[in-house]
Every structure is written in structure tokens, then in C-alpha cells.
Amino acid sequence: MYQTMHRQPADLRRLLETGWEPARQAAELLAPASRVFVVGVGTSYHAALVGEWLLRAAGMDARAVLSFDFAAYPRHYPLGPGDAVIVMAHSGVKTFTMQALERAAAEGATAISVGSLTAEHPGSRLILRTVERERSAAFTASHTSAMFVLAQVATEVAERNKVAAVADLLPALAALPAQLETVLARQDEILSVARAAASRQVYAAGAGPNAATALEVVIKAREAATAKIDGLPLEQFLHGPLVTVNAEDLVILVNVPGANPAAVARTGEVAVVLDRIGSELWLVGQGAPGVPRATVFELPEVPELVSPILAVVPLQVFAYQVAVEKGAHPDRFRRDDPRYADALSTISL
């Protein structure tokens, strides 16, 4: 996991060199579609959520759907030849993700996919390649690269649709590799937060596209470190679940600079509530007024639509460091424990 995280800047630089032509091909395939379903599970679903934001900004009627729901509830997600499906499948082996791809092909929809350099996706008309298949169960580079590829596709779609609102995506994507490099070089700034999290209940929340970032740190810290962590979109967290937070808990708020002013303002208001409860706060992106004792991991301002690609990296580092503190193996999906290895052997992911 550690090695894979630190190669992410190089992975994104390679996609800048090789990814634009496949992105143009994907934009051509998607152009006639009246609707686009972006389908995935686990970390890939979080990438799909970000993809929904990117493609909608580029002028498409896009919707992120869990693989199981899309495959098992076809009447609720009607599909036809005028629709398109983007399947997020890094390894190409997940049961319901493959069923979703099979369904798209069977019903005549345009099916494309996002996967590793060696993934096989039968029925996909185009596989948008990301990185080599990860050896760690805690997927990191595949996630940032999948979001990056979707951003490249959205950039090409926007150009075809003459949508000027996302014109800032191109320079933002070009700047991301160096920005990720800088974040990874600051990993020691996260150590104190990770040490606190190793023995505490942790919550995470984010607004807009970064609701997916908050959900991703939950899945990452759970699978890498068996951490006690929960997360929700910011407003969902406020409306009820926040009352479970105690003074001894740690709360992560994704608060990126350059986000929608309403999101920044609401994040600041939630931060004040949590500060008054007495909880320890870690703000990823920028600080907030009225909470001077919060720990802040500052990030440069980038367009909000691509900010999840950058904001998730310190959270990946956090998950890894919590695993180190707890003595957990971040790569094994707890299969180094015979009980879990036996239990997981009874089901196909």
C-alpha cells in the first residue's frame, strides 16, 4: 500500500501522456447517449460518484449506481440502446460489476469500462486503462487514476458539447501530479492524527463531490487498519448522526479551498458544533473560522470537480499510518487472520 501510494504522481503523469486519445474515443462513444450510468462497488463506487459530478458538469445526464443494484434491479434502472454504461472495475473480477457489464451489452447499451492495464471486461467496447493491477487489497493508485481518467473523459465530452464551465479541468489535471507529490512528501504531518485515530472512534464528512472522499477514507481505514470509523455526506452527518459524536472522538472534515461557498460555509458551521462538543477535528484542505484548535492539512486550491483526486491522498496516508499504529497488515484484507480467511472463502466478491 505504501509503495503504491507513492507511485501515484508517476501514474498520473503517464495518464497525461497516454490517456487523452482513449478519453476522446470514450467521448465519441458516449456522445449519442441520452443517459449514462456509472457503475461500481466499493472504492470503484466512490470513483463512480465523482464521475457522476464530472460528467454532469460536462453536460451529460449521468448517474452513479451500485453494481448490485444495477444488475439485480433492472426494472428500477431501465436500459436501452440509447443509453451508455461506464463500468468501474479495476481487477475485472467482481461478481455484480461483471453482471452489470453483461447486462449493458445484452440490452444494446453502449458499454465502456475503466480498469487496470491487464483487466478483462468482456462486452466493453473500450477499456480505459489506469494502472497495473494492485497487489494491496487497499486500492489507492487505481482509485486516483480511475477518477483522473473520468476527468479526462469529462474534459473531452465538455469540448464536444461546447460546455465552457469546465474549461479549467485541463490545466488542473496537468498540475495534479506535482501536487500529489507535495502531499505525499508531507506524510509526517499526518502522524499525530493517525496515532490519535488508532484508539478512538473516528467520523468523516464532506460536501458536494467530496462526500465521496469522506466515504473513501471510511472504506480505506476499515480495510487497511480495521479502524472504527464512519462517514457520511456532510448534511446527512449533521441531521442526526452528529449527536453520536463524543468529546473523545476524532472527526475528519474535508474542506477543500475553492469549493462551492455554500459547502465551505456549512463545513465551517459543522466544525464549530463539533468543536463545542469538544471533539478533536482534522480539517483536510483548509481551516475554518471559529475552530482555532483544529488540526489542518492544507491543500492548494483546485477546481472542486477534481479536488477529490487530491484530497483523498492525505486520507490514504492516514489509513496506512493508522494500520501501522495498530499493527494491522494493510494489504491483506484481514486474510492473515485464519478466521476471516475461512469466512471470506465462502463467498465470491
Image (tube, rainbow, N blue to C red):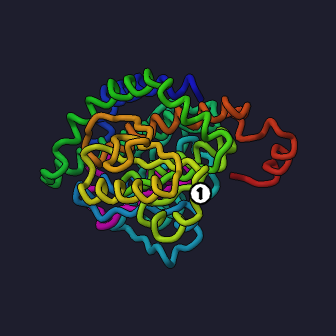
Q: Nearer the viewer, residue 296 or 67?
A: 296
Q: In what element is the residue under mark 1? A: loop
Asked whether, in this view, residue 151 is left or right of residue 142, the answer is left
- Looking at the picture, does residue 121 appear above or below residue 194? below
Residue at 28%, 43% in the rendered image: 257
Q: Nearer the viewer, residue 43 or 274?
A: 274
Report if residue 124 is visible in the image.
no
Q: Where residue 41 sits: x, y (%)?
A: 56, 54
Question: Residue 196 is drawn in which quadrant?
Answer: top right
- Looking at the picture, does residue 20 appear above or below residue 86? above
Residue at 71%, 34% in the rendered image: 326
Q: Within the magenta stretch, is there residue 45? A: yes
Counting the numbered discs, the total is 1
Q: Amino acid at mark 1?
A: Asn
**Which residue does the numbered mark 1 point to in the structure image?**
246
Q: Nearer the viewer, residue 26 or 200?
A: 200
- Looking at the picture, does residue 220 appear above or below residue 233? above
Q: Within the magenta stretch, is there residue 65? A: no
Mark 1 neighbour density, 10 Å: few (under 14) some (14–19) many (20 or more): some
Residue at 62%, 47% in the rendered image: 93
Residue at 81%, 46% in the rendered image: 340
Asked whether, in this view, residue 46 is left or right of residue 222, the answer is left
- Residue extent of the magenta highlight: 26-47
Which quadrant is the N terminus positioned in? top right
Report if residue 333 is visible in the image.
yes
Q: Where residue 239 sits: x, y (%)?
A: 47, 70
Question: Residue 163 is drawn in which quadrant?
Answer: bottom left
